[in-house]
Image (cartoon, coloured by chain):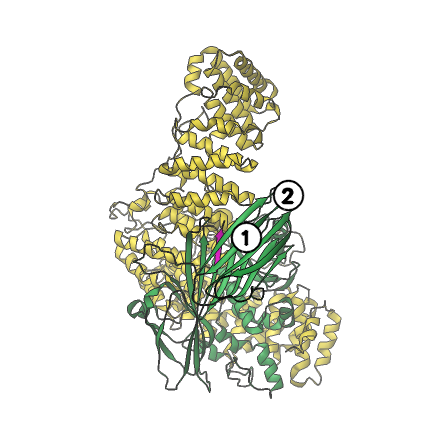
């Protein structure tokens, strides 16, 4: 049940940092690095390498689980019959911690802060491979973040917003860490103080769908997430209730949520960790009464495709079916490996559109990825947007993708119309500021 | 922060030992707040992390161990973790500092000290550690206790028997009822690690302890929850009610945000279901397991992949899970290929009459994609769908014909291969499409497709007017073909001859091929079969006809699933490597302890019928060693290799058997050949298992080596150990 260790590779496949593989021969990590690099080199294209690579040629047999972040590869090696999901869950948690500490995870930030990365690695992954504490709340007590170190050095600079006031009794003094682990609540440290108490919730819903050739929705699922940012003093015990909790199905909660309470009263009762965390994930399903189990897709696309020899022409018409404005709409179309160029014109039609909207949209063709991209920054509720064009290809019968990938965002909107009823604070007496925001996005595959 | 950037990056330059040594010595004087030492040590650690050998600095670095600054202490300890083991002659210099730190006021330092010591498997250190560790296991600070728990596992690895003699296992066991949940989960992790060793104490749970662990679940970190949940597999319910109660307590964990927790929970539930009696509860749990599995599919592709491979196993054993969710597995154009292939397989498994139309429409869509591998599997799946779901067969055939018309070589070849199986499945129903297929003879260049085509020509030679012509053409390259195609040819011409023995062309053809097979070919299979046919035809053509054209058993996809017993066993490894590769881990992971369901009065009869018993192989315990290129670390720890390997299984068992039997039950198996588990219908999995489901099992010689006759989708579940019957 343990991960052997973790290695971070730079974009060229060379190790930047690795955990101490103390109980393994020196060649052990190298072997995995080599296996991964070989697999990546052999892969016909990006993202086609199995995420779990079995390394069994020599007398060892183990596997290497890897994910890509900012051009780097994070790989966790596991031997024995270990759950690769633990490796991936740990990698995710670790990368999130790095983001917490450094903002951006890149080769440069890791190299500049390798000592912190190393300390983090030591604290989160026991050298025998057991994940330890990955809760950012507790870690911040044991490993100071670079911003805190520089703060300590400068000592006069004003407090950085977003960083809670950590008790700094003699920086690394004799009782520096025990606070973290004597806290009765594993995800929250004891004795947090804020002058201004607030908690913010962001409800983010994402629609993922597939639309078939004939325009019918094959699949559309809405996955929601309640992201929270808590800056509350003491041990706040919160109860969050919704007016329509039944739109949330198949929920998954942060460990702080009392599951029994949710099962019984459909109320979220929890003592939040400090800072950012995801309170809940859920799936939205339309009410049972409806025959269609799909959530309607908020836009429609009409594609007239004409395939010719050495290329083809197309006319795409996008229409919004929503009252709200959609933002940052992005349509991607893979023109096939042998595509050479594309030419398009944009236009828009409909009632409220004054000018022919060149300001609203733009298109581009990336000759390396062979991807045609069409962007509309603001898509209002009425009218339609049209992209006409043609592309050329080196081969006689071009093979473009038979699907468009559409991404969009809808601010202040939720598919489920989930509504917070109230948030009650018990066990603390102060007043707090509360806020809830809604946001939606979508990624749709539209086939033709 | 930005000011440091350039500076720190310089630490990554390959350092020079001498330079560091000089700097360390210089730092001894006038080191304000130890900043100088800190900087040098930082450089040294940077070099260690890059894999540069800094061990010559051992003596210089350990001088800094007394520095009253935690940061420096940490770095020195880091150094010791890396090089301590390679300096057995100098390590005694550090021991006083170790002992001092083990009694420091700061719990972080106490923990750091024992942790570091446990990584240095040198006798002096282990000796010193033993007493300290015993104290730390009872430390008042939970951080120290939880670190100590893990250290016990390390100490055990270094010398199992000694750790047992010193009573560490009992101490660890006592921690299972610690008040702090993190300590409990770490103790569980350590005991599991010990229990997974082939030479370790067997770690079993009884009902009381299992319940205690469950109550610690809520307060544990997600990693702790994983350890605890996983350890529940070591509990063998004696009554249906125990298993049911436990499942009810575990099921809320399906709502956890961590995907590994979710999958581990599912593993526990699947395990407990084997011991349940209440059909309704089983159905309820199956229904509850579906949605979290689907939710895993909204994660990153890596998690999706692991989830999909597991789903594939789960739905074979519990088909009601995800029964109505086939849509969740529709592939997206930009899914990574490994996700697509895994989804495809699941779509096929979930296909039923009710959703066959949707599934087929999807498969057709995939068949027009660009990725060759994926397209092939999609085409093959259409054929398998036709075989699996009879009412959909017509539509599938239509769609295959359309695909054949595309003339894309690899599509045509796949289509031909599956069509052959469809003919086998529905004899006399679809032969009308043979002419269509024959139009594409020239497109076939892969052995499997060619062999399939030849089989079709031979089998239906009576229905194809110009069969002899076509076969004659194909036979032209006989001597250059791979064996499987040659075998197909041989049988095909014999069939042709039996159908059309009057034709001169046929006679010449069969003569030519038999002559080749018996005279020019080195392959004994081919030669023997050639002789056999020849003699049969010479002695009694009528009997030959009876044998060669004997009615073939229709193929089905029932045997398409894994053997139930194997499934039960694999599902105990849900989420682990074994479930990714669909193999039992002990078969491909060195040192992995196998798992098997353990019989108890509560075990349901169908599970018992296919129970796979597990022998603990008496292999010498060995550390994983890699004899790869590159330098091998010179001194491997004195691992408990040859010396200890034949010690009969844990001596500690005796003591735990006598005193605290309720905590660690070490009974190997129970003697009660339980018969109280009554047989109730397992509607879930098609009732009792048909062991010999392979339709070819009885065919023996007649078509034995006839490779092309083995239909791809039907790899018999009962063929020993061949669990790779999956598309992937």
Seen at 48% across and 39% down, the residue is B380
Q: Which residue is mark 1?
A: A315
Left-right relation of B67 to A80:
right
Q: Up-down: is B96 above or below B47?
A: below
**Quick one: which chain is green?**
A
Q: In the rendered image, which quarter is residue A144 located in?
A: bottom right
Q: Secondary structure at mark 1?
A: strand
Q: Up-down: is A263 above or below B36?
A: above
Residues drawn in magenta: A443-447
Chain B, colour shown: yellow
- Whole-percent x, y for residue B156 in the image: 49, 62
Pointer 2 local density, CA inside 10 Å: few below 14, some 14–19, many at least 20: some
Between B191 and A226, the residue placed more toward the observer is: A226
Q: Which residue is mark 2?
A: A395
- Whole-percent x, y for residue B109 in the image: 54, 77
- Whole-percent x, y for residue B496 in the image: 49, 18
Seen at 42% across and 62% down, the residue is A223
Left-right relation of B267 to B440:
left
């Amino acid at each position: 049940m343990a991960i052997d260790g973790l290695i971070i590779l730079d974009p060229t496949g060379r190790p930047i940092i690795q955990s101490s593989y103390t109980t393994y021969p020196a060649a052990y990590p190298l072997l995995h690095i080599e296996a991964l690099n070989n697999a990546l080199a052999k892969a016909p294209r990006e993202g086609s390498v199995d995420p779990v690579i079995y390394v069994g040629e020599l007398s060892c047999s183990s596997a290497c689980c890897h994910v890509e972040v900012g051009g780097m590869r994070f790989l966790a090696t596991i031997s024995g019959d270990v759950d690769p999901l633990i490796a991936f869950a740990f990698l995710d948690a670790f990368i999130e911690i790095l983001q917490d500490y450094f903002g951006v995870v890149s080769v440069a930030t890791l190299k500049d802060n390798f000592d912190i990365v190393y300390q983090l690695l030591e604290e989160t992954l026991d050298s025998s491979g057991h994940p330890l504490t990955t809760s950012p709340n507790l870690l911040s007590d044991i490993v100071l973040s670079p911003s805190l170190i520089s703060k300590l050095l400068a000592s006069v600079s004003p407090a950085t917003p977003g960083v809670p006031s950590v008790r700094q009794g003699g920086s690394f003094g004799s009782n520096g860490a025990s606070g973290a682990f004597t806290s009765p609540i594993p995800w929250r440290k004891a004795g947090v103080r804020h002058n201004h108490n607030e908690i913010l919730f962001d409800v983010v819903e994402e629609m993922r769908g597939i639309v078939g050739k004939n325009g019918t929705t094959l699949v559309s699922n809405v996955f929601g997430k309640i992201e929270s940012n808590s800056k509350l003093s003491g041990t706040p015990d919160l109860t969050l209730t919704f007016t329509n909790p039944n739109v949330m199905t198949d929920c998954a909660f942060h460990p702080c949520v009392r599951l029994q309470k949710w099962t019984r009263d459909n109320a979220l009762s929890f003592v939040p960790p400090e800072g950012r965390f995801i309170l809940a994930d859920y799936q939205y399903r339309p009410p049972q009464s409806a025959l269609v189990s799909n959530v309607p897709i908020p836009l429609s696309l009409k594609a007239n495709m004409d395939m010719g020899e050495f290329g083809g022409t197309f006319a795409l018409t996008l229409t919004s079916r929503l009252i709200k404005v959609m933002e940052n709409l992005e349509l991607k179309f893979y023109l096939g490996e042998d595509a050479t160029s594309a030419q398009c014109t944009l236009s828009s039609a409909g009632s409220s559109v004054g000018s022919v909207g060149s300001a609203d949209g733009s298109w581009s063709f990336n000759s390396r990825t062979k991807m045609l991209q069409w962007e509309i920054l603001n898509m209002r509720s009425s009218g339609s947007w049209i992209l006409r064009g043609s592309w050329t290809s080196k081969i006689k019968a071009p093979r473009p993708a038979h699907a468009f990938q559409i991404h969009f965002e809808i601010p202040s909107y939720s598919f489920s119309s989930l509504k917070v009823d109230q948030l009650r604070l018990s066990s603390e007496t102060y007043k707090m500021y509360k806020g809830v925001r809604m946001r939606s996005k979508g990624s749709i595959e539209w086939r033709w | 922060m930005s000011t440091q950037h350039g500076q720190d990056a310089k630490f990554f330059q390959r350092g020079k030992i001498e330079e560091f040594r000089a700097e360390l010595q210089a730092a001894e004087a006038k080191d304000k707040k130890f900043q100088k030492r800190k900087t040098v040590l930082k450089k040294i650690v940077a070099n260690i992390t890059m894999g540069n050998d800094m061990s010559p600095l051992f003596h210089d670095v350990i001088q800094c161990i007394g520095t009253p600054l935690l940061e420096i202490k940490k770095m020195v300890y880091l150094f010791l973790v890396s090089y301590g083991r390679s300096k057995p002659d100098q390590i005694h210099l550090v021991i006083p500092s170790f002992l001092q730190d083990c009694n420091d006021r700061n719990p972080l330092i106490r923990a750091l000290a024992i942790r570091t010591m446990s990584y240095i498997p040198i006798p002096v250190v282990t000796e010193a550690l033993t007493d300290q560790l015993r104290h730390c296991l009872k430390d008042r600070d939970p951080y120290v206790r939880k670190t100590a728990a893990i250290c016990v596992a390390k100490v055990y690895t270094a010398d199992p028997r000694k750790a047992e003699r010193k009573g560490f296992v009992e101490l660890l066991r006592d921690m299972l009822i610690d008040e702090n949940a993190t300590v409990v989960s770490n103790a569980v992790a350590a005991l599991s690690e010990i229990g997974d060793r082939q030479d370790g104490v067997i770690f079993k749970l009884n009902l009381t302890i299992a319940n205690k662990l469950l109550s610690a679940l809520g307060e544990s970190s997600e990693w702790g929850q994983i350890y605890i949940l996983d350890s529940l597999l070591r509990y063998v319910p004696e009554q249906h009610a125990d298993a049911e109660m436990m499942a009810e307590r575990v099921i809320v964990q399906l709502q956890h945000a961590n995907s590994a927790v979710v999958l581990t929970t599912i593993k526990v539930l699947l395990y407990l279901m084997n011991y349940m009696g209440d059909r309704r509860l089983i159905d309820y749990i199956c229904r509850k397991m579906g949605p979290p599995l689907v939710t895993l599919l909204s994660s990153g592709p890596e998690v999706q992949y692991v989830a999909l491979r597991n789903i594939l196993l789960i739905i074979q054993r519990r088909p009601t899970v995800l029964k109505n969710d086939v849509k969740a597995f529709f592939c997206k154009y930009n899914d990574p290929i490994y996700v697509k292939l895994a989804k495809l397989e699941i779509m096929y498994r979930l296909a039923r009459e009710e959703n066959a139309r949707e599934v087929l429409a999807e498969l057709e869509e995939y068949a027009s994609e660009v990725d060759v591998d994926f397209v092939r599997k999609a085409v093959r799946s259409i054929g398998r769908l036709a075989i699996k779901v009879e009412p959909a067969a017509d539509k599938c055939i239509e769609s295959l014909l359309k695909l054949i018309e595309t003339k894309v070589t690899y599509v045509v070849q796949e289509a031909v291969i599956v069509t052959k199986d469809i003919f086998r499945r529905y004899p006399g129903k679809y032969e009308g499409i043979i002419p269509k297929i024959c139009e594409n003879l020239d497109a076939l260049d892969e052995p499997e497709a060619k062999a399939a085509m030849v089989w079709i020509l031979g089998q239906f030679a009576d229905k194809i007017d110009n069969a002899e012509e076509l076969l004659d053409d194909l036979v032209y390259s006989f001597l250059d073909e791979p064996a499987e195609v040659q075998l197909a040819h041989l049988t095909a011409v014999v069939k042709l001859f039996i159908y059309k023995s009057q034709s001169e062309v046929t006679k010449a053809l069969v003569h030519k091929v038999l002559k080749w097979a018996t005279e020019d070919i080195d392959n004994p299979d081919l030669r023997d079969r050639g002789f056999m046919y020849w003699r049969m035809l010479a002695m009694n053509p009528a009997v030959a006809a009876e044998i060669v054209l004997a009615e073939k058993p229709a193929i089905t996809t029932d045997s398409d699933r894994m053997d139930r017993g194997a499934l039960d066993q694999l599902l105990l490894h849900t989420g682990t490597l074994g479930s990714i590769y669909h193999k039992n881990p002990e078969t491909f992971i060195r040192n992995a302890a196998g798992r098997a369901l353990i019989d108890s009065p509560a075990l349901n009869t169908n599970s018992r019928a296919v129970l796979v018993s597990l022998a603990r192989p008496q292999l010498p315990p060995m550390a994983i060693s890699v004899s790869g290129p590159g330098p091998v670390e010179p001194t491997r720890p004195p691992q408990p290799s040859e010396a200890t390997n034949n010690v009969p299984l844990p001596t500690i068992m005796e003591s735990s058997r006598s005193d605290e039997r309720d905590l660690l039950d070490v009974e190997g198996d129970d003697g009660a050949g339980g018969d109280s588990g009554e047989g109730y219908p397992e509607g879930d999995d098609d009732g009792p298992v048909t062991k010999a489901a392979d339709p070819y099992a009885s065919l023996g010689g007649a078509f034995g080596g006839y490779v092309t006759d083995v239909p791809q989708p039907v790899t018999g579940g009962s063929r020993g150990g061949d669990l790779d019957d999956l598309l992937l």
